[in-house]
C-alpha cells in the first residue's frame, strides 16, 4: 500500500512558495513544495497543518482539494498536491532555503521529480 504524502501549494501575491531540500536527504538540493508524510492517525488537512507548522512555523487556515497526485514507485509514496492558505511569514526550519517564486519561473528551479511533474501540470492549468 502506498504511503500518502502531502505537498502544499501556498500562493501569495501571485507567487508560490517552494523550498530547497537540505543536502544529505533524498533529493537533497532540489526544490519542492512543502509538506510530508501523513501519519496513520491524521486526516489530510491535519497532516498539512502539522507539516507546515513543523517546517515553516506557519498556521494553516485552509486546505483545498487535491489538485494533482503522483505515485513515486521507488519510494512507495503517493504525493498529493493541495492548495493551502497560511497565516504568518514562513521560516525555513527544515529546508536550506525558501523562496516565493513567480509561477512562470517554477521550471527554472531544479525541482524534485514529482514536484516537477506537478509544476508542469500547474503551469498548463493556470
Image (tube, rainbow, N blue to C red):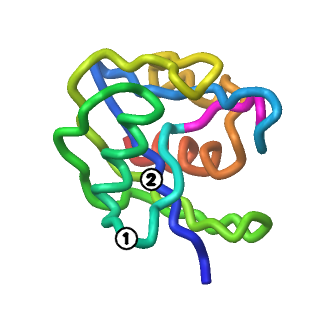
Please determine whether, in this image, residue 11 is positioned above or below residue 115: above
Query: Horizontal placement of 57 versus 1: left or right?
Result: left
Q: Residue at x 36, y 26 (%)?
A: 57
x then y, percent, for residue 115: 60, 45
User: Residue 23 lies in magenta, yes or no?
Assistant: no
Q: As displayed, is residue 28 above or below residue 75?
A: above
Identify the element where label 1 is drawn. Answer: loop
Q: Residue at x 46, y 54 (%)?
A: 6
Q: Which mark is residue 2?
A: none
What range is drawn magenta here? 28-32
Residue sitting at x 79%, y 27%: 23
Crowding near the residue tagged with mark 1, few <14, some 14–19, many ≥20 C-alpha atoms within 10 Å:
few
In the rendered structure, are the residues bearing label 2 and label 1 in contact, judged by CB atoms less than 8 Å apart?
A: no
Mark number, residue 41:
1
Query: Does dot 2 land on a helix, a strand or a loop?
Result: strand
* Residue 120 in the image: above or below residue 43: above
The residue at the far front in this view is 41
Query: Would you say 57 lies left or right of 38 here?
Result: left
Of labels 2 and 1, the one closer to you: 1
Sequence order check, earlier mark of 2 and 1: 1
Query: Is 117 or 55 nearer to us in this picture?
Result: 55
- Determine the residue located farthest toward the bottom in the rendered image: 1
Spatial separation of the CA atoms under disc 2 and disc 1: 20 Å
Nearest the viewer among 110 and 50 is: 50
Q: Position of residue 126 (x, y in %)?
A: 37, 40
Is 99 situated above or below 41? above
Query: What's the residue at 79%, 66% (across, down)?
Result: 74
Count numbered badges in the picture: 2
Q: Which residue is mark 2?
A: 81
Amino acid at each position: 500500500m502506498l504511503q500518502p504524502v502531502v505537498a502544499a501549494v501556498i500562493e501569495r501575491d501571485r507567487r508560490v512558495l517552494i523550498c530547497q531540500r537540505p543536502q544529505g536527504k533524498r533529493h537533497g538540493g532540489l526544490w519542492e513544495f512543502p509538506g510530508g508524510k501523513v501519519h496513520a492517525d491524521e486526516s489530510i488537512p491535519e497532516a498539512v497543518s502539522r507539516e507546515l507548522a513543523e517546517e515553516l512555523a506557519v498556521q494553516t487556515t485552509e486546505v483545498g482539494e487535491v489538485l494533482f497526485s503522483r505515485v513515486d514507485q521507488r519510494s512507495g509514496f503517493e504525493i498529493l498536491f493541495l492548495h493551502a492558505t497560511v497565516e504568518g511569514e514562513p521560516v525555513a526550519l527544515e529546508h536550506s532555503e525558501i523562496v516565493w517564486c513567480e509561477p512562470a519561473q517554477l521550471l527554472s528551479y531544479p525541482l524534485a521529480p514529482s514536484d516537477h511533474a506537478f509544476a508542469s501540470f500547474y503551469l498548463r492549468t493556470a
